[in-house]
Amino acid sequence: MFSFCSDPSVLDGLAWLSCYLTTGTHLLFYASFGVVLLLLAVTAPIALLFGYGGAMASRSRIAPVRWFGRIYTAMVRGVPDIIFFLFVPIALDQGLEWLRHKALCDSDAPVRQGNDFVVCAAAKLPLSTSPEWVHDIYAMVLAVVAFSIVFGAFAANVLYGAMQAVPRAQLETAEAYGMTPRQVTRRILVPQMWTYALPGLSNLWMILIKATPLLFLLGIEDIVYWARELGGAKTRSFAYPHPDWRLYYFLVVLVFYLLMTWISERVLDRVTARLTRGQATMAGEAQRKAVAP
Amino acid sequence: MTCAQTILDYGLRSLGFGERLLPRSDFTLCQQFTLIGSGLIWNLYFAFFALLFGFFLATGLALAKTSTNPWLRKPAEAFIFVFRGSPLFIQFFLAYEALVLLPRTGVQILGLTVATSWLAKAWAGALIVLTLNTAAYSAQIFHGALMAVPKGDIEAAEAYGMTGWTRFRRILWPTMLRLAWPSYTNEAIFLFHATTLVFFSGFPAFQQRGDSLYYASYFAGQTFNPFVAYPIVAGYFVLCTLALIALFGIVNRRLNRHLPGAARRIRYRPQIFR
């Protein structure tokens, strides 16, 4: 990075450290913090959408849709989320390849042959000829889908509870005014449910932050991967030899997560205060009294 | 090979008894059920002891957090913040890296050599991390419950001349537990599910003695088929979770037995409040 870094073996002290911390792999390590933030930014809205769909499906009047919603929301109960993180990407990958195998391959050979999963070259996802970054993006997309499905189910639980918590009288009044079910949902139910959903959703956001290191298990080069790679002892054959420093790298990662949760807590407290304003709840009443002497 | 023979061979494989070599090919359903069930012993072991030790530690931490003495309160708050604010997955890695740095020959304390190598093994190291983790979450729950103990209860206790330890043991603690129990049930379920992380983080599975998910991922990796092993481990976990809820429900009824109508079923919302 710097001009004096050309021969690291003669450096020592701060100069050595500044060169060491700006090597190419370290820049990738810093970029991987961005990967975590990207995953959070992409997953949270998708999961919220899945959750909204799940909650609406659980309230549906059509029985099969309702069953589907109930099964989806019940799915994450009782089963550790990490099982889903391991299962969903492989299952999805194999499902897609199987579909492409049916459509694109001539052979009638079964995809499962003994302990192997075999599809023809044209059905591979991504194609073996495609460049490295396509493989990276594909792995990331699978991870996002896995996270969205699991956290969508959590969010569905929260939103379903929040929809049930909206006072019945509000919905009945809307019906008495002659609104259709669709109008009742859009004009009365959805605007009022957020204050009930917020404690659950903010908790979910915290759980989502703390679930991001599991990306490592999905084979993505995230902060855990780089912390292990860079921290491991480096022998004399490396440009920057050092003993086992993984402890310090993980301490940095730990501090990063502590900061993330700390900032989130501050922000969510503000959002809660904003959303309770004027609500007919205990918190809303307390807020009103605090302002008006 | 019959299924009974498989169970004899692999039933306690996760503890190091029976057949040492894992099956390599032609996996039968029986083998998968047996080995994954064998790994479940580890999940139950971690969950049981972490909850047991964590419970007492959490009570102490919750009390320290209510203390007016900053020398007690600040450390308790910092402990809870660190363990609640960071992912368990990272805590496992960090603990493992810290524990392997301990000298292999042991530490000299007052002329005695204290062996330390066992601390880097999963059965001890991971248990310590899980205990501290659940203690932090439970302490937060208990602290909330302690704050919610009705003022009248405490005044009544004082009117009877109860102070200090007697007041805590007879009035504060039972009420705290009663109020905290539904949330604590959720925490217990979450911790039980978190035990699956042990062998996927820093801690290696010595001689392939892993937990249920370790074996499930072994099968899924060998057969390239996730549709058998993962549903099996999921099924085991659903059953254990139901048993856990039943167990905590019994305690809940016992805690609320003096309140007719209050001993409702615990509303089951795992992983939502943590």
Image (spheres, rainbow, N blue to C red):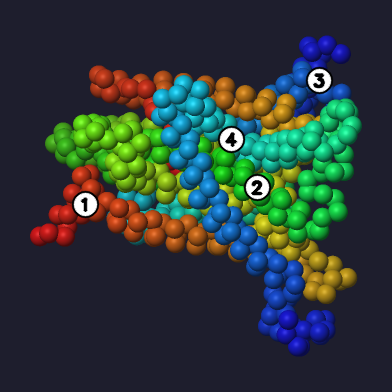
Viewer-side label of 2, 3: 2
- Label 2 resides on the chain identified as A
- Label 4 resides on the chain identified as A
**Considering only order in the chain, which callout, 2 or 4, is on the residue closer to the N terminus?**
4
Determine the CA span between mark 3 and mark 4: 25 Å
Q: Which mark is residue B28?
A: 3
Residue flagged by tag 1: what amino acid is it?
Answer: Gly
Q: Are marks 4 and 2 on the same chain?
A: yes
What is the x, y in percent for residue B274?
Answer: 45, 43
State the residue at coordinates (26%, 20%): B261
What residue sits right under mark 2 in the picture? A143
Q: Is residue B162 left or right of residue B247?
A: left
Say which quarter of the image contains residue B94. Answer: bottom right
* Label 4 Cα crowd, 10 Å radius (few <14 / some 14-19 / many 20+): many
Q: Kindly indicate whether the residue at mark 4 contacts the one at mark 3 (C-beta within 8 angstroms).
A: no
Viewer-side label of 4, 2: 2
Q: Is residue B29 above or below residue A138?
A: above
Q: Is residue B75 left or right of residue A274?
A: right
State the residue at coordinates (32%, 22%): B263
Label 1 sits on a secondary structure element that is loop
Q: Are marks 3 and 1 on the same chain?
A: no
Determine the CA span between mark 3 and mark 1: 62 Å
Q: Which mark is residue A278?
A: 1
State the residue at coordinates (77%, 70%): A242
* Label 1 Cα crowd, 10 Å radius (few <14 / some 14-19 / many 20+): few
Q: Which mark is residue A80?
A: 4
Q: Kindly indicate whether the residue at mark 2 contacts the one at mark 4 (C-beta within 8 angstroms).
A: no
- Label 1 resides on the chain identified as A
